[in-house]
Image (tube, rainbow, N blue to C red):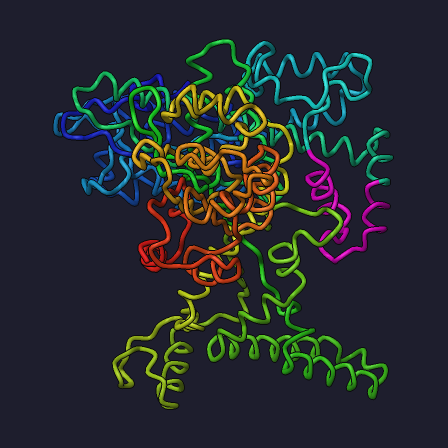
């Protein structure tokens, strides 16, 4: 809706090139509040409320005399007034967000100065690397509607009327559109689940745990997990108060997910139109989106993130308009997590950046109690305090004094730990159940979450009675340098003070840790692929993709429907490899064997060996294909398929588990000699996953 206006649409100024925009979508504002947000950003909120005449507005501007802070303060107060008086449904305290909102406002303007179109909001900063606009949006359905679903919709008919109203108001998709298919779990009129919003067991357990405090992260035995599953199934059959509350929570998540998905598609479509209508050959602007919502709506990538992806998938598959499906697919490709696919893909005559994905940042309050069971000085303090209480017995008159004294000592110990041992504080924070459970052990409890609570977890302490002052930092710096550690890097006491939490631990091992982590992640992903390779996939889609990549009808026919759907590549190496009869081929990252099978055909090694003819050993002198892959499950599947296809395995075709960075080890285990053994090497989408590419290429060349 907003992208159709001049302010939210194409850049119409001559001096403002098409640059990315940052769209900030906040749960604190309902969708109905978009008008006051638009007015706030365009510095005309009083025009929205119609309480000031133009001459009064001009007088206010003259009185401000260009004072940006005064102007921002007045605009913010007007926003708060409209938020409370004109709507009053959400009830958030906006004052902690004043700086953020004012910053967003300052990046846009409607002043008709310097020849700039008055309908266009431009960046105050002319730096080409900065965002052209930072635009604010309301994200949630008004809170009173969620309460209505919980309290006023006891049966199917009342729910049907309610959801029809929500669709008409624009909070949810309308029936007949693609996104509607992602709204409800079931559409069976005979089912008790009719008009039940689509959610997941994991999300329901999460929301219920926020209400009842259930532990979702402590490891459970298999039997216990089955018991919990049985309980959850029984719970699903009952219209319990918790279930109704969960549906009300889902209503907010679905409304925000629908809002975000719609904005993503709308902006992408507008950017495409701007790109095609412009004389420049530049691709569409690459907008960014910042979603601000409570952890209950985002934690473990459940709730809103799930809804956004489901709505985009439903639109890409089910919308009756082909152009709309194409736009949804474009957006979906961009918001899915990064993968091993290439960084861009050409669709509809322009290049899309692909797989940029999303990052989830969580905020977790840290309390001294997190360290009471792990940090020895605090443990000793608590033990001494408990012992003193036991000795003194009834010390009613001294309770408050002792409690305050203990709190002060704990605060002092925490401050010292922060200033003098940040790495140790790191360790103890990660050891605490409140952090390690949702962040590190998220898949061990009864919910078996598929993602950690966040990709980045900001752990902070907000204690007004225990503030780290500038002088504390200077003293800590002085103590460090006195011990021979030049934290500031200047070698003297005048070094600039800095926060000690600069994560210097294991600097020398950072690269190795990242290296190992990337390799483990790749191995885990493709082991999972190999384990499901026997499940039949979509051969028609595989044919379409491979045809676009340049595989011929003969290639597709040769592979057949039993293997086509396991194609994993990103291009077609055979177009440039030009494999000839009798050549020996190395396939790096051979995966499930598709390109190896074609290579075997091209080198004429696919002739089935006749054991009676005594030609089992001919393969060592002629055509041979060796596939190497990191994932054992893929190696096993490719070998099994090679045998099933009638190839001579392992004489003309063999698959080895190995790392291209250590090919000698893999070849040695398989008794394959190394050095001038191959005529050609192919690889399809594997080198992009290799961490030490130079070493890998040296091995291949060798």
- Above or below, 102 against 363 in this view is above
In the rendering, at what x and y percent does residue 269 appear? 37, 20
Residue, x 86% and y 46% (percent of image)? 227
Q: Can you see residue 86?
A: no
Q: Residue furthest left?
A: 114
User: Which one is in front, 339 or 8?
Assistant: 339
Instruction: Left or right? Give the position of 338 relative to 273.
Output: right
The rendered magenta stretch, by its main secondary structure, is classed as helix
Residue, x 49% and y 25% (percent of image)? 558
Q: Quadrant of residue 353?
A: top left
Q: Quadrant of the N terminus?
A: top left
Residue, x 23% and y 16% (percent of image)? 277
Q: Residue furthest bottom?
A: 483
- Above or below, 561 against 78 in this view is above
Segment tinted magenta in the rendering? 200-229
Tell how many labels: 0
**Residue 668 belongs to magenta span:** no
Q: Quadrant of residue 123?
A: top left
In the rendering, at what x and y percent does residue 116 appear? 17, 26
Instruction: Left or right? Give the position of 360 relative to 113.
Output: right
User: Which one is in front, 663 or 344?
Assistant: 663
In the rendering, at what x and y percent does residue 636 appear? 60, 46
Q: Can you see residue 632?
A: yes
- Above or below, 417 against 552 in this view is below
User: Which one is in front, 386 or 501?
Assistant: 501
**Residue 211 belongs to magenta span:** yes
């Amino acid at each position: 809706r907003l992208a159709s206006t001049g302010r939210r649409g194409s850049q119409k100024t001559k001096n403002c090139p098409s640059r990315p925009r940052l769209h900030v979508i906040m749960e604190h504002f309902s969708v109905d509040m978009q008008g006051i947000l638009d007015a706030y950003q365009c510095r005309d909120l009083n025009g929205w409320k119609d309480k000031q005449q133009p001459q009064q507005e001009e007088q206010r501007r003259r009185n401000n005399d260009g004072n940006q802070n005064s102007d921002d303060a007045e605009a913010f107060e007007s926003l708060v007034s409209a938020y409370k008086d004109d709507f009053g449904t959400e009830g958030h305290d906006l004052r902690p967000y004043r700086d953020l909102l004012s910053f967003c406002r300052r990046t846009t303007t409607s002043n008709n100065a310097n020849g700039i179109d008055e309908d266009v909001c431009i960046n105050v900063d002319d730096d080409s690397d900065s965002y052209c606009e930072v635009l604010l949006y309301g994200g949630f359905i008004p809170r009173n509607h969620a309460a209505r679903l919980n309290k006023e919709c006891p049966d199917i008919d009342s729910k049907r009327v309610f959801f029809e109203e929500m669709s008409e108001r624009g909070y949810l998709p309308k029936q007949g559109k693609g996104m509607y298919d992602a709204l409800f779990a079931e559409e069976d009129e005979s089912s008790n689940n009719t008009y039940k919003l689509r959610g997941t067991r994991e999300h329901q357990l999460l929301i219920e745990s926020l209400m009842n405090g259930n532990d979702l992260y402590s490891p459970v035995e298999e039997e216990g997990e089955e018991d919990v599953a049985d309980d959850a199934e029984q719970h699903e059959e009952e219209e319990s108060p918790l279930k109704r509350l969960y549906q009300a929570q889902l209503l907010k998540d679905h409304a925000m997910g629908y809002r975000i998905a719609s904005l993503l598609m709308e902006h992408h479509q507008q950017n495409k139109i701007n790109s095609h209508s412009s004389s420049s050959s530049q691709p569409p602007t690459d907008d960014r989106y910042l979603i601000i919502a409570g952890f209950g709506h985002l934690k473990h990538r459940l709730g809103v993130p799930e809804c956004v992806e489901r709505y985009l998938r439903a639109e890409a598959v089910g919308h009756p308009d082909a152009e709309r499906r194409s736009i949804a697919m474009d957006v979906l490709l961009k918001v899915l997590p990064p993968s091993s696919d290439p960084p861009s893909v050409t669709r509809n005559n322009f290049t899309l950046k692909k797989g940029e994905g999303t990052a989830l940042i969580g905020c977790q309050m840290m309390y001294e109690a997190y360290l009471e069971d792990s940090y020895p000085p605090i443990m000793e303090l608590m033990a001494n305090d408990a012992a003193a209480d036991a000795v003194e017995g009834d010390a009613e008159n001294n309770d408050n004094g002792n409690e305050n004294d203990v709190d002060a000592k704990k605060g002092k110990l925490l401050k010292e730990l922060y200033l003098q041992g940040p790495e140790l504080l790191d360790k103890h924070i990660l050891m605490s159940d409140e952090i390690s459970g949702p962040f590190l052990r998220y898949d061990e409890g009864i919910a078996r979450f598929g993602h950690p609570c966040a990709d980045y977890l900001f752990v902070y302490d907000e204690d007004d009675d225990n503030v780290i002052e500038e002088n504390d930092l200077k003293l800590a710096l002085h103590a460090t340098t006195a011990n021979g550690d030049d934290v500031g890097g200047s070698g003297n006491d005048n070094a600039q003070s800095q926060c000690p939490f600069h994560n210097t631990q294991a600097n020398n091992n950072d690269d190795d840790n990242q290296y190992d982590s990337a390799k483990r992640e790749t191995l885990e992903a493709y082991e999972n692929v190999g384990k499901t390779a026997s499940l039949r996939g979509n051969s028609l889609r595989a044919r379409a993709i491979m045809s676009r990549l340049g595989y011929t009808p003969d290639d597709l026919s040769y592979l057949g429907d039993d293997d086509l759907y396991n194609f994993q590549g990103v291009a077609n190496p055979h177009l440039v490899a030009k494999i000839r009869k009798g050549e020996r081929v190395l396939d790096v990252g051979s995966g499930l064997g598709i390109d190896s099978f074609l290579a075997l055909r091209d080198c004429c090694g696919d002739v089935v060996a006749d054991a009676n003819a005594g030609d089992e050993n001919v393969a060592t002198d002629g055509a041979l294909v060796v596939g190497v892959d990191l994932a054992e499950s893929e190696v096993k599947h490719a070998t099994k398929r090679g045998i099933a296809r009638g190839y001579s395995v392992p004489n003309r075709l063999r698959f080895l588990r190995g790392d291209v960075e250590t090919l000698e080890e893999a070849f040695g285990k398989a008794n394959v000699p190394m050095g001038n053994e191959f005529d050609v090497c192919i690889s399809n989408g594997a080198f992009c996953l290799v961490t030490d590419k130079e070493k890998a290429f040296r091995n291949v060349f060798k």
